[in-house]
Image (spheres, rainbow, N blue to C red):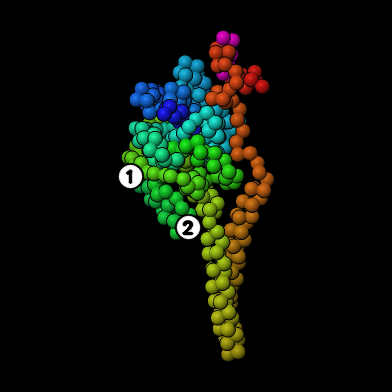
Amino acid sequence: MTEPVLTIVVPCYNEEEVLPETMATLTLLLEELIAESLVSGQSKLLFVDDGSKDRTWELIYKEGLRNDFVRGLKLSRNVGHQNALLAGLSAAKERSDCAVSIDADLQDDITVIREFILKYHAGCDIVYGVRKGRDRDSVFKRSTAQGFYKIMKRLGVDLVYNHADFRLMSKRALHELEQFKEVNLFLRGIVPLIGFHTDIVYYDRLERQAGETKYPLKKMLAFAFDGITSFSVSPIRMVSVVGFVSFLMSMVFGGYFLALKFTGNTETGWTSLITSIWLIGGLQLIAIGLIGEYVGKIYKETKQRPKFIVDIDTLNLPLPRRHFLDQELDYRKVSETSQ
Ligand code: UDP
Ligand code: MG
């Protein structure tokens, strides 16, 4: 059997601090895997620049000129981690037998990639990397993340517990992933829907090597909310239940207020009345807001907008890469000349 072509896809957003280290470590790993005949010599590292504002693309491009393992995909603007990852995976799928996705900060143990490959050889189409514990995360991150998985489970969304986007997917699985056309992309929820033969590899998650987290609280909350509303209609059902209960309660209170009226004590009812007006008004607003959330999603899906736009692709580029070196072109001008 010939060795499989592996592409390691790394989404990068403002990662100039950690990238040199990441590129060096992953190159070493790839060389080892090739030497052990686990993967083909054609295997590559694909760094996806998700519209970074720092020197990320410059680093990727320049490294690619002297390191033949390194290739780059430059997106036209920042589209977020999930879309950047998908962009990398779709660029990789034609020329690879399998692809591994991993974050640029090397928080995930890269030695696990060897086990991914071994499982791939054993016939797995999807291999999930799962964190053993979260001792290294801050208390806040740990509790919010665990709460998130628990809520998702309650809502009936099938997620692999403690699995981030560190996984191997075969060519077959990557092609099936393309079938999921939704715009509100939540890969962790979608990949389990693909099925096929899957397995899990456990590992310890490390601290970020350098730079800051690109997921501040605001993005984390948005991510969780998106994840829930993209996969489950339970919130809408919950609102209906609350609405029904409050309707019943208002009937009871209505009877009570009527009784008060007939006994002549109407003024005293003002407080409870005004409170219930606010209460019902609030509930209605929540309900409308939630319905709006789903309507907004439907609206986005029907537009079928592209999830990302590729600016430069040095993985599938038809021009020989040497071409750029000979002419000593500036890395920034590549997109203009290649069009
Ligand atoms: N990332 C991205 N686009 C974004 C935000 C993040 O491509 O808009 C990348 C980032 O460069 C990193 C990965 O997504 O490789 C995960 O981000 P980070 O490590 O900051 O998240 P955390 O591990 O703190 O959840
Ligand atoms: Mg990280």
Which quadrant would residue 246 be assigned to in this image?
Answer: bottom right
Q: Is residue 213 visible?
A: no
Q: Which residue is mark 1?
A: 132
Please give the range of residues in magenta: 326-331
Disc 1 or 2, which lies upstream in sequence?
1
Between residue 61 and residue 219, name the one nearer to us. 61
- Quadrant of the snapshot with the C terminus: top right
Exactly how many numbered labels are in the figure?
2
Which quadrant would residue 131 be assigned to in this image?
Answer: top left
Q: Report how far apart the C-alphas of labels 1 and 2 lie in the structure.
A: 23 Å
Name which residue type carries label 1: Lys
**Residue at 39% in and 44% down:** 199
Q: Which residue is mark 2?
A: 156
**Residue at 41% in and 33% down:** 105
Image spot of residue 138 (x, y percent): 36, 44
- Secondary structure of the residue carrying tag 2 is loop
Instruction: Tell whether position 181 is magenta.
Output: no
| 319 horizontally vs 25: left or right | right
Image spot of residue 67 (x, y percent): 45, 18
